[in-house]
């Protein structure tokens, strides 16, 4: 039980007093307001708030109070609050005292308040900070710009994620659709490719998120405007035309080239695009649907690796905004889906086929049924003793997909993969997680399995050598000699088991979001 004593009850005091019963959850807590404003006493009593009509500066009044755990000195006048504070500190030396400075503060008053009170409230300074936060910060201007851009759209908006979207891209697209609806714009959350990772599918299904899966053959003519989320360039890790006119771009990855768009918001300090979209929801004064809030929080957690990777204060702020609206039971279900047998087989092949030089391990998993198994395999290799950087790759149709992970401080995987594979494919990502995809058209012209296997062996050798060379070329990095070799296999015996994989985010696109 906590006994809160409010001495004086001016403008600020009234606002605080009226919210104390709502903010404190223990019914046993006690509250008493002492003020010499008879009208305030009557109003508080009408609201069932205990109040006493008395002069809070009178020593006898405080002397008659037997206990006080928390004291709020809350008159509008500085001289009154100073007198009350001095008497309250003398009477209750161990109490926690919050004192409002009032409206006519001298430097000697401020010094005295800081000596005696545990917390000093300066309403003028707080108001200025609040105004600056609400008006002058860049994100406030961005919200105005986004609303203005949305209001110019006459027709339907396609909010396009990167290919094979991860939770951050999915949540961001759904949030932008909600914001567009607020402005009166109909919009669809769209993506090309597949949502094959079991946790990503669980997120979409359990939250009943409305997404549209586009194919390259679909006409885009029904859309009058286009927005890109979690990536920033049309035709790069999405299947839009490269010359498409883009109305809106919202991303948190550093761009690898010019970013087209009428409205562009690239917040590289944010750990996730979901963080940016949460800020927009807050700036627009929108309370997110529970499904959207849950998706956004999950997107932030995945992209920041549960707030441990490239995290910023904005990510924590976004999480605090979302948390009251999150379906925690659904979030737990999303995080604990069943693992498919194909995924475990892929991880087993990666472990068996790995080649290791020093702390760097590379593995081919051969034919690939589910490309989302690659980042999980890369994470699993990272748990091997002595391994700090991993690359896992596999073949599907006429493409090779690569996924890399690192916990080494001197390795930037995004730059490493770009150095090694940008000339023969598309690559990129973060310092500690990245991906690439390479087109191997010659596989489609091969006549038999022996010929295909021969081509695959050559490609495996090229990819492995290029990655080691790219790692070696980074300043101050040396992977050393081979410490383990293996034949390239395309199957694994049943007795070769593997532990259940840990959750991994997909790379983020080849220009920053999800890729391989």
Image (cartoon, rainbow, N blue to C red):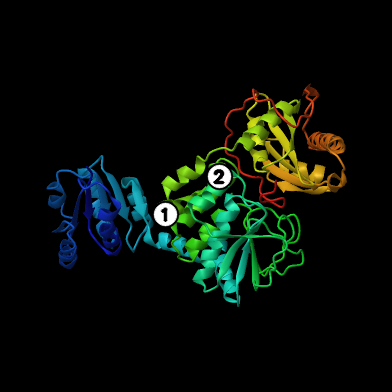
CA–CA distance between discs 1 and 2?
Answer: 21 Å
Frontmost residue, 365 versus 6: 365
Q: Which mark is residue 220?
A: none
Q: How far across and down, in percent of the image, does residue 408 sit?
A: 68, 33
Q: In this view, does 313 lie above or below 503?
A: below
Q: How far across and down, in percent of the image, does residue 252 sit?
A: 63, 54
Q: How many labels does the image show?
A: 2
Quarter of the image with the N terminus is top left
Quarter of the image with the C terminus is top right
- At 27% from the left and 48% from the top, the residue drawn is 25
SS type, badge 1: helix
Can you tell which quarter of the image residue 344 is in?
top right
Q: Which of the two labelled residues, at mark 1 and mark 2, occupies the earlier sequence position?
A: 2
Is 317 placed left or right of 68 in the picture? right
Q: Residue 199 carries which label?
A: 2
**Nearer the viewer's eye, disc 1 or disc 2?**
2
Is 485 placed left or right of 142 in the picture? right
Frontmost residue, 122 versus 24: 24
Q: How far across and down, in percent of the image, does residue 395 sit?
A: 76, 41
Q: Is residue 114 above or below residue 407?
A: below
Q: Would you call the spot at circle 2 few (<14 residues within 10 Å), some (14-19), or many (20 or more)?
A: many
Residue that mark 1 sits on: 325
């Amino acid at each position: 039980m906590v006994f809160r004593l409010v001495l004086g009850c001016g403008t600020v005091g009234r606002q605080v007093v009226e919210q104390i019963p709502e903010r404190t959850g223990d019914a046993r807590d006690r509250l008493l307001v002492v003020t010499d404003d008879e009208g305030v006493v009557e109003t508080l009593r009408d609201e069932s708030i205990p109040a006493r009509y008395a002069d809070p500066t009178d020593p006898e009044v405080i002397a008659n109070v037997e206990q006080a755990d928390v004291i709020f000195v809350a008159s509008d006048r500085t001289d009154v609050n100073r007198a009350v504070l001095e008497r309250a500190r003398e009477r209750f030396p161990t109490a926690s005292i919050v004192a409002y400075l009032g409206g006519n503060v001298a430097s000697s008053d401020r010094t005295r308040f800081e000596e005696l009170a545990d917390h000093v409230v300066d309403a003028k300074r707080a108001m200025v900070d609040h105004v600056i936060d609400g008006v002058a910060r860049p994100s406030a201007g961005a919200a105005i710009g986004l609303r203005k851009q949305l209001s110019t759209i006459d027709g339907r908006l396609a909010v396009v994620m990167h290919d094979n979207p991860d939770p951050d891209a999915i949540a961001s697209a759904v949030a932008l659709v909600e914001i567009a609806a607020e402005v009166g714009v109909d919009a669809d959350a769209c993506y090309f490719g597949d949502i094959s990772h079991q946790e990503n599918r669980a997120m979409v299904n359990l939250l009943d998120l409305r997404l549209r899966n586009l194919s390259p053959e679909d006409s885009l003519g029904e859309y009058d405007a286009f927005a890109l989320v979690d990536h920033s360039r049309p035709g790069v890790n999405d299947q839009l035309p490269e010359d498409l006119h883009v109305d809106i771009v919202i991303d948190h990855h550093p761009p690898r080239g010019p970013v087209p768009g009428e409205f562009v918001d690239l917040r590289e300090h944010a750990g996730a695009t979901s963080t940016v979209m949460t800020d927009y929801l807050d700036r627009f004064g929108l309370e997110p649907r529970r499904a959207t809030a849950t998706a956004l929080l999950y997107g932030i957690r995945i992209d920041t690796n549960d707030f441990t990777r490239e995290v910023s204060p904005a990510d924590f702020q976004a999480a605090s905004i979302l948390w009251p609206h999150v379906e925690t039971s659904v979030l737990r279900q999303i995080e604990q889906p069943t693992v498919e047998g194909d995924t475990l087989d892929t991880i087993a092949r990666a472990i068996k086929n790995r080649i290791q030089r020093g702390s760097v391990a590379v593995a081919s998993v051969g034919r690939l049924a589910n490309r989302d198994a690659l980042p999980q395999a890369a994470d699993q290799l990272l748990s091997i003793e002595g391994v700090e950087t991993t690359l896992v790759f596999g073949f599907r149709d006429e493409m090779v997909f690569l996924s890399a992970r690192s916990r080494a401080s001197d390795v930037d995987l995004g730059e490493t993969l770009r150095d090694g594979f940008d000339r023969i494919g598309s690559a990129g990502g973060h310092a500690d997680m990245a991906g690439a995809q390479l087109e191997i058209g010659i596989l489609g012209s091969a006549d038999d399995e022996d010929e295909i296997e021969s081509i695959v062996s050559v490609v495996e050798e090229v990819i492995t050598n290029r990655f080691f060379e790219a790692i070696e070329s980074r300043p101050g990095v040396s992977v050393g000699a081979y410490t383990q070799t293996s034949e390239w296999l395309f199957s694994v015996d049943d007795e070769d088991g593997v532990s259940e994989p840990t959750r991994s985010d997909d790379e983020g696109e080849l220009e920053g979001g999800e890729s391989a």
